[in-house]
Amino acid sequence: MGTTPPGSHDQEKLIPRDEKQPETTTQPTENPLTLDLHASSTRPFLAAGMEISIDPARQVLTLATPDGASLARLRLLASINTTAGTDEIRVTEVNVNAPDGNLTQVGITATSSLWQHHHTQLRAEGDALELTTTVQGTGRITSIRQLGAHVAGSGLLPSDLLHSTVFSPNPDRPWQILRPAGESAALGVVGDGGQPGVGRWLFTPPPLCLALATADPDASPASGGPCLMIGVAAKRRPFTQLTYDALTPGFSLRYDYDGHTSVEGHFSTPTLLLFLADNPYDGLNRYRELLDARGLLPARTQAPPSPAWLEPMFCGWGAQNADALASIGDQRPAVDRARQADYDGYLHTLATHGIVPGTIVIDDKWQQDYATCRPDTEKWPDMAGWIRERQGAGQRVLLWYKAWDTEGAPPEACVRDHTGQPVALDPESPAGRHLIQQAARSMIGELGADGIKIDFTASTPAGSALTHAGPSWGIDLLHELLAVLYQAIKDINPDALVITHTPDPGFRDVTDMLRLNDVLMLDQPGGHTEPPNTTPGTGVVDTMTHRARVATSACPELLIDTDGWALPSQAAYLSWTSAQTGLGVPSLYYTDRLDVPDPSEQPIPPASLHATAQHWAAYRATLTVEAE
C-alpha cells in the first residue's frame, strides 16, 4: 500500500484538505440524527432549492424539484483505490442534521479494506450541495469512484438511472449534444484523433461539469427543462480523466489518478457540487460562479487582450490540406505546405477576392522540431523578415505550437515510459521547463511572432509506469505546461495572444482565446459528413454554436476563435462563414478550394468568397462602432 511502483515519482506525502477542495468539515449546529441502517427512506427535506429524501439502508439520495419532478437518485458512497487494491467498504453509520426540515448535513461512516478512516459528508451550502469523502491512511491512489462504491460482499453499487439524458460539455460525438443516460462520457486531458476508438481531443479539458435531466435526447439542451448539475470543485486536479461511467441501469463517476498521488495521512476526494439549473448552459455559468465564490479559480492577472485580436483570422491548415488533396503544384503532403511561398500564395488568393485577414496563423509544420520551435529554414528562408513585413501591413502573425511533443528534446526534459523512451515534455523538470521557455523566446522574441495557437493538449501523458520530475499529474500537469509557456510569452510581449482549446474555467489564467476546434470528427463514423436528414450547413452551425455556448458559459472573460476546419460541403462553407461573426472571431481556413473528397465539390465559387468578404466587412463595421 505504501510502496513505490517502478517508474513512479515519489510525490507529496500529505495532501492538506484545504488545498484540494472546499472545506467540508464544519460541525452542525444541532446534534445530528443517527438513522437506522435498516429503515426505509426518510421524509422529504429541503436543501439547495430541491426536495431531498435519504434511504439510509442503501445510502441513496433522491433529488427532485420543489414541485416534485424527479431529478436523480444518487448513491452517497465513494471508493478511493490504490496500488494495493480496491477500496471495499462497509457502512456502519448514517446521520442527518436537518433542523426544521432543512437539510444541512449528512454523514456516512464506513470501514474500509484499505483505509483506517473512511467518512463521506454531504453538506448544504447556499444553493448547492457539496459531497466529499475523506480517508486516513497510506497509499498511492490509482482511481477514485464517486456516486458509487465497491461494497464488501456486493461489488460495485452505482447510482440509479432515474434521469434519461446526460449533457457533457465535451464534444466527443459527431453532431450529438445530449446522450442517453446509459451511455458513458469522459471529461479530461487525454484523447487522440488519430487512434481508432479514442477521440475526446476537442476540448481538453472541458468544464468538469455534467447535467442530468429527464429530457428527450433529441431535444435542445436550452429548452429541455430543469436539470441537475454535477460539477467537480477542487484546486488540485491530479487526475487525467473524469468519466461518467454508465453501467445500465446505473452509473458512477470515476477519476483516473494512475498511481501518481501518494498519501500518508488524510486525503479528501474532489468535492462534487450538486445544484439545480434551468438548462445546461446556465448550469455551466453557475458552476463557474460557484467555483469563483469558493476561491477555487485562478485569477487572471494579464490585461484584457488588445482589440486588434478581434480582427478576422486566417489559418492555413485547411488550405494546406486542400492543396495536398488536389495535388496543387506537386505531390507534397499537407505538413510540407507550411512554407513561406505557399502562405504568400494563400494570402494573395484571398486578397484577389477582397478577403484580408487581420491575423494570420502559420500552421503545422513550419518548425524544424516541435519541441524547440526554430523555423525550418528550407521552408522559411526568412521567417522573421516575413513576419515583420506582415506586421508592417497592419497584420499580426501567430505560430502553431504542438503541446507535449518531444521532437528535438533531450530525454531529461521529458516524461518517460518504463523503457526510458520519452513520451511527453515534462514542464516540472529543469530541462523541460527551460526548453519550453526557450521555445517561447524563439517564437516571440527571435522571430517576432505576435502570439501562438496551442494544439494537442489532449496528448497529456497518462499511465502508471511513467516517470516525471515533479508532483503534478493529469490536469494539473497540463496546466503547469501552459503556465510555463504562457508566462514566458507574456514576459517577452504582454500583448501577445495565446489560443488554446481548454474551456475549463481553471485554465482562464493561461489562455486569452478559446478555439472551438475541428468542425468534423474525421476519426469517427458519422464524423466525415453532416448528419443525415438535415439541411446542408445546419449541422455545422448547430454543433459549433453549442461549443461556443459551452466556452462562453464557462469562461465568459475569454475571446472565442470560431475555427473552420474541416468543412464537409460548399453549403457548410456558406452557412458557417455567415454564422461565425455572431459567435466570436471569424476564422477562415480555406482560400479558393475545400479539402473534400469529391473533386467537383472542391473549388469555392467566387460568389461564396465574395460573401465571405462581405461578412468580414460587416463584422469589422461592428468593431469600429464598438471602438467609438
Image (tube, rainbow, N blue to C red):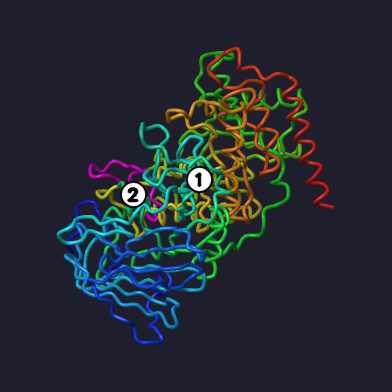
Residue 76 lies within the magenta run:
no
Q: Are marks 1 and 2 in contact (CB under 8 Å)?
A: no
Q: In front here: 454 or 397? A: 454
Residue 12, how many percent across, how many down?
31, 66
Q: Nearer the viewer, mark 1 or mark 2?
A: 2
Residue identified by numbered label 1: 439
Image position of 119 (left or right of 171):
left
Instruction: State whether residue 33 is above or below residue 37.
Output: below
Precedes in sequence: disc 1 or disc 2: 2
Residue at the (34%, 65%) spot, across then down: 269
Give the quadrant of residue 113: bottom left
Could you say which disc has been placed on residue 245 in the image? 2
Is 422 contained in the magenta span? yes
Displayed quadrant of residue 313: top right
Q: Find the distance from the CA under tag 1 to the CA under tag 2.
A: 39 Å
- Is residue 411 found left or right of 214 in the rendered image? left
Q: Amino acid at mark 2?
A: Asp
Q: Please name the amino acid that badge 1 sits on.
A: Ala
Res. 381 image quadrant: top right
The region drawn magenta spans 410-430
Q: Position of residue 536 (x, y in %)?
A: 61, 26
Q: Is residue 282 left or right of residue 210?
A: right
- Where 143 sits versus 352, above or below? below
Q: Describe the element under mark 1 as helix, strand or loop.
A: helix
Image coordinates of residue 109 in percent, x first then y, are 25, 73
Q: Dot 2 surroundings within 10 Å: few (below 14), some, or many (20 or more)?
A: many
